[in-house]
């Protein structure tokens, strides 16, 4: 007999449901970023480990009362920071259900439902992104881990082609491989490479053009020992490397081509946007976050690998108690993890809710809103040095001082929130339109704050 009866779970789920509904009801009115009072009130959690137990529904009550006001309303319509998606209703519902089922999605034997549904999502995603049927999909927490996963497979495969088995003979004395990447690669690309034992001195950085795109004529001669890493969506300006040309160059040389498209790869699912990622289907591997552009909720990140066996041979687990003989899918053959929650079911639910048309509409609407936002901000008086790429752009004012003051004003306004960055040595305000809750109306609600931010500079 379980310690808790279903009725006891019901009480706490009812409480969580009410709290969640209240949160969603208030989301459109919430400050885009928690105010200092809400953040200070978090000190209520800072107590010694309690000696006595609490009622579960009281734990949820406390969490909701003090936690919710200190959340960032990144699922709302006025948050443009980092690249943060909202959450689709079916994904939220599936997430609740998956937590109730509490499946270990790592092995088929632990959860046939997780294996079966993730397998379906694999087929859908492979087609959506133009990878050949039979490609492997792995689901990880975020692109930082997705990149690491793909690079493990790429490194081991490039080394194994030279007659060396990394799993048996180790990496220290292995034949060398080359890493060719953009001078503007995302910091998580760098981290993944560091984790795998590569230092910056060993990497070959390719110069970029005015918008941060790799210049094909500056790519060093490639060979079949090379991991070539491309970027689909620069984190500051959103630009895309010329994937078609670069994948051709990589393939002709026998290199392993990876495309990091944490948010930008979703351009592939829209007829209007797919020109950005032309040639993607020729890559060996890629990564993109469902929790960003698809709005699946955290943590849900996808990797695709054309060579299933390269991924499996690098990641599959051994151990006598692990049923590696099952003909069915073991989800953990495609990620570095063993036990994990059933992300595949949540991904499936998001895709099932939208369908092919809904997914395309989601992307197209995001891109329309981004263009609309950029036009309004230019009208107000912001400079927009670069074009809009997909769902990203940045703005600035004539001097760094003005830009920094305007950003500080926007960030403390409560009306909207976004982050800063530097671009070609200048401070900029970066805008990412990633949440499904963003509409032209929610953008209009933010415009007075942008006007004030300029005015504030001239006081
Ligand atoms: C191009 C790129 N790669 C990787 C990442 C890391 O993604 P995650 O936060 O899911 O680890 C990001 C995050 O914005 C990104 O823009």
Image (spheres, rainbow, N blue to C red):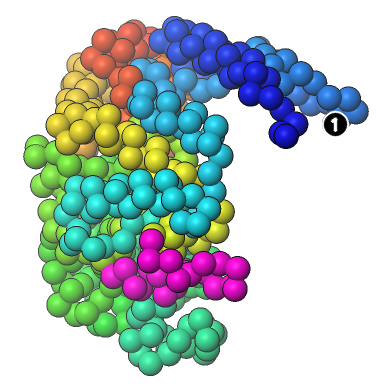
Residue tagged by mark 1? 49
Q: Position of residue 382 (x, y in %)?
A: 27, 23
State the residue lying farthest toward the front.
Answer: 1
Q: Is residue 415 left or right of residue 68?
A: left
Q: Is residue 21 left or right of residue 270?
A: right
Q: Quadrant of residue 401?
A: top left
Q: Position of residue 9 (x, y in %)?
A: 64, 22
Is residue 40 positioned above or below 280 on the image?
above
Q: Start and end of the magenta stretch?
A: 307-328
Residue drawn at (33%, 8%) of the image: 445
State the residue lying farthest toward the right.
Answer: 51
Is residue 130 positioned above or below 225 on the image?
above
Q: Quadrant of residue 437?
A: top left
In the rendered image, the quadrant that contains the C terminus is top left
Q: Position of residue 248 (x, y in %)?
A: 13, 69
Residue drawn at (18%, 51%) of the image: 127
Which secondary structure dominates the residues rendered in magenta?
A: loop
Q: Is mark 1 within 8 Å of ligand 1?
A: no
Magenta stretch contains residue 247: no
In the rendered image, the quadrant that contains the N terminus is top right
Frontmost residue, 140 versus 449 = 140
């Amino acid at each position: 007999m379980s310690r808790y009866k279903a009725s006891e779970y019901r009480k706490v789920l009812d409480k969580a449901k009410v709290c969640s509904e209240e949160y969603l009801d208030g989301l459109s009115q919430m400050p885009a970023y928690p105010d200092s009072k809400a953040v200070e009130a978090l000190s209520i959690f800072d107590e010694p480990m309690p000696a006595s137990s609490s009622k579960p529904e009281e734990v949820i009550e406390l969490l909701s009362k003090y936690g919710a006001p200190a959340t960032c309303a990144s699922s709302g319509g006025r948050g443009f920071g980092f690249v943060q998606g909202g959450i689709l209703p079916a994904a939220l519902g599936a997430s609740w259900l998956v937590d109730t089922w509490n499946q270990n999605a790592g092995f088929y034997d632990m959860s046939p439902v997780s294996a079966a549904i993730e397998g379906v999502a694999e087929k859908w995603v492979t087609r959506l992104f133009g990878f050949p049927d039979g490609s492997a999909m792995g689901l990880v927490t975020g692109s930082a881990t997705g990149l690491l996963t793909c690079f493990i497979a790429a490194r081991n495969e490039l080394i194994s082609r030279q007659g060396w088995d990394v799993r048996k003979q180790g990496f220290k004395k292995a034949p060398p491989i080359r890493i060719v990447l953009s001078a503007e690669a995302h910091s998580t690309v760098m981290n993944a490479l560091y984790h795998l034992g590569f230092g910056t001195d060993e990497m070959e950085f390719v110069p970029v053009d005015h918008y941060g795109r790799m210049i094909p004529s500056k790519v060093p001669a490639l060979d079949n020992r090379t991991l070539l890493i491309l970027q689909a969506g620069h984190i500051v300006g959103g630009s895309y490397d010329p994937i078609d040309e670069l994948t051709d160059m990589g393939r002709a040389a026998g290199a392993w081509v990876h495309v990091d498209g944490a948010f930008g790869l979703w351009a592939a699912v829209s007829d209007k946007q797919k020109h950005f990622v032309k040639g993607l289907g020729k890559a060996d591997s890629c990564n993109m976050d469902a929790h960003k552009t698809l709005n699946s909720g955290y943590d849900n990140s996808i990797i695709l690998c054309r060579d299933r066996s390269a991924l499996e041979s690098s990641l599959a687990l051994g151990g006598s108690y692990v049923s590696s003989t099952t003909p069915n899918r073991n989800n953990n053959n495609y990620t570095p993890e063993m036990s994990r929650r059933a992300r595949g079911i949540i991904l499936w639910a998001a895709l099932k809710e939208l369908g092919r048309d809904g997914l395309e509409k989601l992307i197209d609407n995001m891109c329309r809103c981004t263009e609309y936002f950029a036009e309004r901000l230019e009208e107000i008086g912001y400079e927009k040095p670069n074009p809009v790429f997909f769902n990203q752009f940045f703005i600035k004012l004539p001097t760094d001082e003005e830009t920094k003051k305007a950003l500080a004003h926007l960030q403390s306004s409560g009306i909207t929130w976004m982050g800063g960055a530097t671009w070609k040595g200048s401070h900029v305000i970066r805008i990412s339109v990633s949440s499904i809750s963003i509409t032209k109306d929610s953008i209009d609600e933010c415009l007075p704050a942008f006007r004030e931010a300029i005015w504030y500079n001239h006081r």
